[in-house]
């Protein structure tokens, strides 16, 4: 797969794709896309609240407000996705082109019974799987009672399901990247996915690995998504803007998570744990703090690649290695800033090396995903559907 397209497109004025030209004045596209984004954001805040509840208060049952918030977000995204699938299907059956509906290339579902824009299909499938794993989680609670761990089998399934919905949200906005709301949506949806994706790597915590899986996941997904967003939108400032948005999201979660857990505990008449201390909020403190430095490194290497004429097959790996090394080096420093033991020189070298290797892999994958988003997320208007 050729990766020259994303690199050569960065910094130039994007040309509107046929599907976007048709839908530019339609309100349906941005309303549905923003509803999916609002659903994923709601799920993220609900999860951060739930994790903080476990840390500050203790085990819980299935029916809690944090769980309700988590499930409501997925339901909101699922309903919006289903609505767009039904609208596109109705348009096809009426003999109208479905290219007017942004959200990705239309896909035939169940042999053509439904016509679903790709992004909404993935987002809706994730929401449906979330419901199924939610039922499994309810059954799990009926067997074992209180929740004591984060990485139970139903939880990992729930995390993966929400991740699918978040991926669908990125695809939906990427398909409308030639509009202002599409570009803004990519920059908003990627930080949500950056925050959430490493959580799924906790499924590997029990393995005897030399490096904690969630640290590798942080490096991989953060670097991959920063580069992918930059190459998809095709603007120099994308990585820096995305990193700044991630920082703002981290600040909001930092305030919200303990506040919601403590208010809900008071309302429920439950005491906080005796040994809380002054530890930082659990989920927000795991978000890389120095992402702006990583974004600056990626942007600088991207500019250097254009200036030196590096091949599109090599430049993304170099960008990824640079950004990954910065994130890998910063994670032990971040842990020390948040109260853990300061890192040794060997630990810093190890995490930098892990960042270089993982970041290079992330850059390789990011360039190919950017090609898919730019070429295959938008349907050509020349073909009737």
Image (spheres, rainbow, N blue to C red):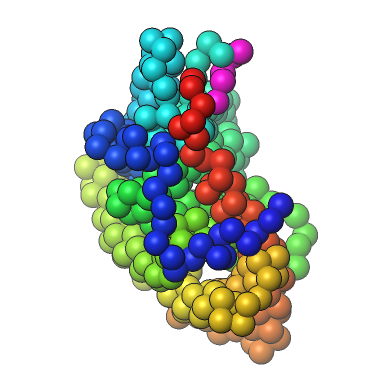
> Would residue 196 appear left or right of 320 to someone viewing this image?
left
The quadrant holding residue 74 is top left
Q: Nearer the viewer, residue 376 or 270?
A: 376
> Would residue 331 appear left or right of 46 to someone viewing this image?
right
Q: Nearer the viewer, residue 245 or 60?
A: 245
Count of numbered badges drawn on the protein: 0
The answer to whether residue 146 of the structure is visible from this angle is no
Q: As drawn, which residue projects farthest toward the bottom?
A: 345
Is 110 inside the magenta-drawn segment?
Answer: yes
- Which residue does the image show at 41% across and 52% down from the upper left? 15
Residue 63 versus residue 338 in the image, above or below: above
Is 250 inside the magenta-drawn segment?
Answer: no
Main SS of the magenta part reads strand
Q: Which residues are magenta?
A: 107-111
User: At which x and y percent is residue 249?
Assistant: 34, 60
Q: As drawn, which residue projects farthest toward the front?
A: 382
- Which residue does the image show at 64% across and 54% down from the upper left? 368
């Amino acid at each position: 797969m050729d990766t020259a397209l994303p690199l050569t497109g960065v910094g130039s004025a994007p040309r509107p794709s046929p599907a976007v030209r048709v839908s530019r004045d339609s309100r349906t596209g941005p309303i549905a896309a923003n509803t999916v984004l609002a659903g994923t954001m709601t799920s993220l805040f609900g999860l951060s609240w739930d994790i903080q509840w476990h840390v500050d208060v203790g085990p819980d049952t299935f029916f809690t407000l944090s769980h309700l918030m988590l499930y409501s977000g997925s339901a909101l995204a699922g309903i919006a996705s289903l609505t767009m699938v039904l609208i596109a299907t109705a348009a096809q059956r009426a003999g109208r082109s479905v290219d007017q509906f942004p959200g990705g290339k239309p896909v035939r579902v169940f042999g053509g019974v439904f016509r679903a824009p790709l992004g909404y299909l993935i987002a809706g499938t994730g929401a449906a799987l979330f419901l199924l794993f939610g039922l499994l989680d309810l059954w799990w609670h009926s067997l074992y009672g209180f929740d004591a761990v984060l990485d139970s089998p139903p939880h990992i399934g729930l995390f993966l399901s929400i991740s699918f919905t978040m991926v669908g949200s990125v695809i939906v906005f990427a398909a409308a990247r030639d509009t202002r709301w599409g570009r803004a949506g990519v920059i908003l949806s990627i930080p949500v996915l950056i925050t959430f994706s490493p959580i799924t790597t906790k499924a590997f915590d029990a393995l005897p690995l030399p490096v904690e899986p969630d640290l590798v996941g942080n490096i991989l997904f953060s670097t991959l998504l920063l580069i992918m967003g930059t190459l998809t939108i095709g603007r120099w400032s994308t990585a820096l803007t995305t990193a700044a948005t991630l920082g703002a999201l981290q600040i909001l979660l930092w305030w919200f998570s303990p506040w919601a857990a403590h208010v809900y505990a008071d309302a429920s008449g439950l005491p906080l744990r005796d040994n809380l201390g002054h530890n930082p909020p659990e989920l927000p403190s795991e978000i890389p703090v120095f992402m702006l430095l990583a974004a600056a490194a990626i942007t600088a290497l991207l500019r250097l690649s254009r200036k030196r004429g590096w091949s599109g097959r090599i430049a993304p790996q170099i960008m990824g290695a640079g950004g990954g090394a910065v994130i890998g080096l910063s994670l032990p420093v971040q842990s020390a800033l948040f109260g853990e033991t300061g890192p040794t020189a060997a630990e810093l070298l190890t995490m930098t090396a892990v960042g270089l290797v993982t970041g290079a892999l992330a850059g390789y994958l990011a360039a190919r995903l950017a090609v898919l988003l730019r070429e295959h997320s938008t349907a050509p208007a020349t073909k009737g559907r």
